[in-house]
Image: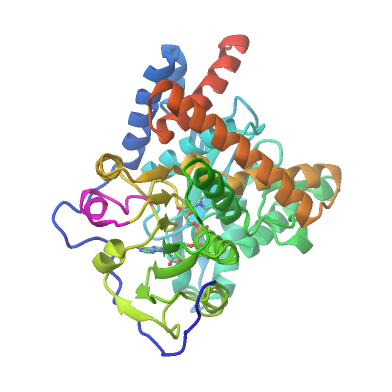
Amino acid sequence: MTAKTDSTPVIPAPPQSRSTLPGAPKEYDFFKVVQDYLEVAAKVINLEAYVGTILSQPKNEIIVNFPVRMDNGEVRLFKGYRVQHNNLLGPFKGGLRFHPQVSLDDVKALAAMMTWKSALMRLPFGGGKGGIKFDPNSVSKHELQKITRRFTHALGLNIGPDYDIPAPDVGTNGQTMAWMMDTYSNMVGSYQKQSMKGVVTGKPVASGGTLGRAKATGQGMVFCLIEWAKEHSFELEGSTMAVQGFGNVGSNAAVILSKLGVSTVAVGDHTGYIYNPEGFNAHKLQDHVQAKGSIAGYPGGKAISRDEFFSTKVDIFAPSALENQIGDAEARTINCKVIVEGANGPTNPAGEKILLERGIAILPDVLANSGGVTVSYYEWVQNKRSESWTEEEVDAKLERAMIRAYREVSDFSRQKKCDLRIAAYALALQRIEAVYREREIFP
Ligand code: NAD
């Protein structure tokens, strides 16, 4: 379905992480945004005040500073975070981000969102998130391995297969998880070593990962989008899409959707933005990014600015890079029918208000990108049972889980007359509240 005329080499427009239009998002207090959504959702369900108070802050905030000797002999100090938001429903669970903009506040926001996601998807997990503030593209592979291992060591027993289970996020991948699992297994001693595979998820399959995990977040977005399309008589086949962020999440969503006849016509990442009205070959572009680290230098299409990217006319817009990308200015120019949030927090509240006023549907992060943690759970179960499921089994389970979650969120939103994001938060909060009511507060 997607026409492939990817032939002319293209140099993407220079990196520009913010709109130049007036009203574009600048400073951003991501954690406050998540706290505000929590408050709104709490009102919708009359959440017990003490439950809201507990959930308004993370349980633990861990900061580690650790040294690594770099290839040139210099010693560099790195700052790493692990925020453990809540573990009422099960072990803390959530990704690790390697990015120069990692901050404690952002990690707190992302950790809280993991608590809602696990609860919404009925997983026996709580929420956590972590990261290291540095640019993984600026170090050698050898240095990256040392940084990852030393960070794992610094976290020590603050993580564990029954306590806190990291996974990949921006700037990390299966390889990162293999190094972490290996480091952790060697820290606990020979007798326990074999039962430590589940300390991280998103591992490569040969190292104890599950089939279907690498594409799981993109796959979950697609299942969610299919349900939305059915509900709104929207024809996926023949539709067009713009994807911001062509890493794990964005590229897999584009590849899977290309098989359903969705043509990706605009793509962007940290190096710039490109446009091809006939549609990029999502597979080839994914291969290019995996080989080169970005879309830069991909042949085909023409370089466009960030502002042009956001105003490209498409049916589906899939923000799959970072938070706070769609603010006031972007929301006014975005020209699509539905936004499927692959990234966490890509739409800020001002942007969201405008989009909803304009009648653009938003499939919110907590629902739309929850396929990743859901398949992470399947991986963790397989590790515990020493099993290996087929990709078909994993996909089928994920499909059922996403359909159920979509329907619950959609029904709730209709009944309570709230948007899908607040509905997703509210459903998650209801489940957590039910357990607090039963267990009460220790002592
Ligand atoms: P990734 O590192 O594989 O890809 C990140 C992409 O974002 C890259 O293409 C990168 O170039 C792009 N990017 C970075 N900075 C940018 C900028 N300033 N402007 C435009 N593009 C930029 O990461 P990922 O795992 O695909 O994660 C992407 C988003 O999805 C994040 O918000 C993450 O929290 C969320 N998410 C990931 C998973 C998962 O399973 N990996 C699950 C749920 C949610």
For image coordinates 60% across by 65% down, the residue present is 259
- What is the tally of numbered marks visible in this picture? 0
Q: What stretch is highlighted in magenta?
A: 323-335
Question: Residue 303 sits in which quadrant?
Answer: bottom left
**Coloured how?**
rainbow
Q: Give x and y (percent) for residue 40.
A: 35, 24
Q: In this view, does 406 lie to the left or right of 188?
A: left
**Residue 53 seen in the figure:** no
Residue 200 vs residue 66, the one in the foreground:
200
- Residue 356 visible (yes or no): yes
Q: Report the residue that reaches farthest toward the left.
A: 22
Describe residue 5's horizontal placement relative to residue 353 as left or right: right
Q: Quadrant of the N terminus?
A: bottom right
Foreground residue among 300 and 57: 300
Q: Which residue lies furthest to the bottom in this view?
A: 8
Measured as percent of width and height from the top left, residue 227 is found at 55, 44
In the picture, measured across the screen, residue 58 lies left or right of residue 439, that is left
Q: At 51% from the left edge and 45% from the top edge, which residue is drawn? A: 368
Does the segment drawn in magenta span residue 299? no
Residue 329 shown left or right of residue 255 in the figure: left
> Looking at the rendering, in which quadrant would you find the C terminus?
top right
Residue 234 in the image, given as x and y percentages of width and height: 47, 50
Please state which of residues 211 and 51 is positioned toward the viewer in this rendering: 211
Front position in the image: 166 or 234: 234
327 is within the stretch colored magenta:
yes
- Reply above or below: 396 against 435: below
- The x, y position of residue 86, in whole percent, is 54, 29
